[in-house]
Amino acid sequence: MTIQPVPQLDELAQAQAQAEAMFASVERSLAELREAVESLKERAIAGEEIDATTTSKTVTQLSETVARCQKAGLILYDCLNKQAGIARGGYALDLDKARADIGCKLDRLRCAIGSGEFPE
């Protein structure tokens, strides 16, 4: 008998791995862009002429990278919440408490069948 992996867990693990890889890529891109921005800043402070096209391109890349970072963060956050059992609305199911509550209700029903009264 072989144990088959649960498809949802495999998909969740894959999504999390992809999000983590995307996040690492974005971190590298941000580091490169930071160096580019610092270089532009140093050139501006030194009084050198700065090409508007290069500056515009760097700022555009920076904003695109920040957007990718936010997307990767949301994907990673969703994956971690799914692993923790937290639904999209931000609530989590406490299965232990639910199990205990159901057990108590079943106990009350069993007692009621036998004695005719409900315990409190």
Image: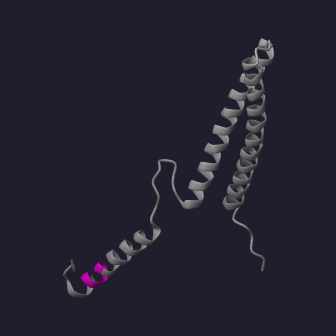
Q: How many marks?
A: 0
Image quarter for residue 52?
top right
- Depth check: give the residue in front, 40 or 23: 40
Task: Kindly give the residue lying farthest to the bottom in the view shown.
Answer: 114
Q: Percent x, y for residue 51?
A: 80, 13
Task: Kindly give the residue lying farthest to the front in the view shown.
Answer: 46
Colour option used? one colour
Residue 58 makes an appearance in the image: no
Secondary structure, magenta segment, majority class = helix
Magenta stretch holds residue 17 = no
Direction from residue 105 to residue 13 in the image, left or right: right
Q: Percent x, y for residue 108?
A: 28, 79
Residue 90 makes an appearance in the image: yes
Q: Percent x, y for residue 12?
A: 67, 56
Question: In the rendered image of this protein, does residue 107 appear above or below residue 66?
Answer: below
Q: Which residues are magenta?
A: 108-112
Residue shown at the point (64%, 49%) measured from the top left: 76
- Depth check: give the residue in front, 102 or 110: 102
